[in-house]
Amino acid sequence: MMDRIKVVLDELNQSKPQGQMNMRLRVLEDDDYKNGVSDQASTVLADAFHSYGAFDWLAEVEPDPDKVDTMKKRLVKYAVAVGECLLRSSGGFTLVAERVDNDGSTSLVGALHSWPETDRKSGFLDSLKSAFRDIRVLFRVGLPPATSTWKSTRLLLNRMSACFIFETKREEAMIGHPEPYWYLCKIGVSSNAQGCGIGRRIMQAHTRIADALDMDIYLETETEQLMKFYEKCGFNVLIEYKVECKGSAPLEPIWGMRRIKHALNQT
């Protein structure tokens, strides 16, 4: 699989769109996790996701107003770490976009986390496998951050537990599609490089990879602006829902979107 992914990226890297910055697309390899490149990708994703309303919804339980933004940053960082752990244990990949300057130096400006999923069965063994995977993640990334009081920490954990509906709704939306599909967990561009077509280029790379492997892609979004962008990339809304937690206002709306393999890409 990785050889085919590299072929797709090599083809894209040889065809630079007119008017776009000079960039290189590649998938992180084992050495990148040793020399800190994966940390750079995580930083870019955390930077991009800091503006997402879901993290506002989680961080607002912090009773000290001066600590809300810090709590939000810690939550984003934790979510990115969990995503990276899941993709590495599920045979996924981190796709990065590196800006190439005139002197040949590079800087990481965009990243994407994605891994293959299937229409899971609901039997005992399947539930057990899923539980073991979640336990491994906790051992690797640790427990989520705590707020300044026990009461607000308990509310935070309740809200985080409510977010498991993302997985439930994904499985619900993809019922009847037992073949493996890509779950695009996170995609982001560094705040100082947005508006340069980097996100479009990264998405183009992923859709071509999916087409080369005859696989669909599924993702979630909470903003209408991004929903319209994904529609131009060939995605269609499969499901719309809200995240509810007792004693809290719901987080809504959430759109679950699917791109069928070889769908028309308008970007």
Image (tube, rainbow, N blue to C red):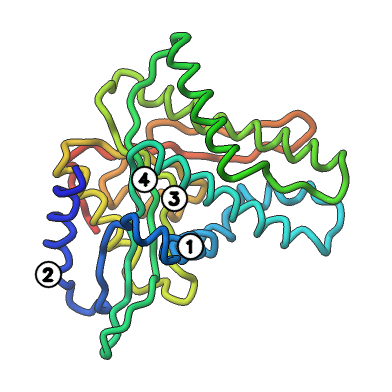
Q: Nearer the viewer, mark 4 or mark 1?
A: 1
Position above or below: 139 against 11: above
Using the rendered view, name the quadrant where residue 87 is placed: top left
Percent from the top left, x then y, of residue 46?
54, 60
> Of marks 1 and 2, which one's residue comes earlier in the chain?
2
Q: Estimate how packed mark 2 is, as few (under 14), some (14 to 19) or many (20 or more) residues with alpha carbons within 10 Å.
A: few
Q: Which of marks 3 and 1 is in front?
A: 1
Could you give the CA–CA distance between mark 2 and mark 4, rounded to whole angstroms?
23 Å
Tell me the element at label 3: strand
102 on left or right of 3: right
Tell me the element at label 2: helix
Tell me the element at label 4: strand
CB atoms of marks 2 and 4 within 8 Å: no
> Of marks 2 and 4, which one's residue comes earlier in the chain?
2
Could you give the CA–CA distance between mark 3 and mark 4, rounded to whole angstroms?
7 Å
CB atoms of marks 3 and 2 within 8 Å: no
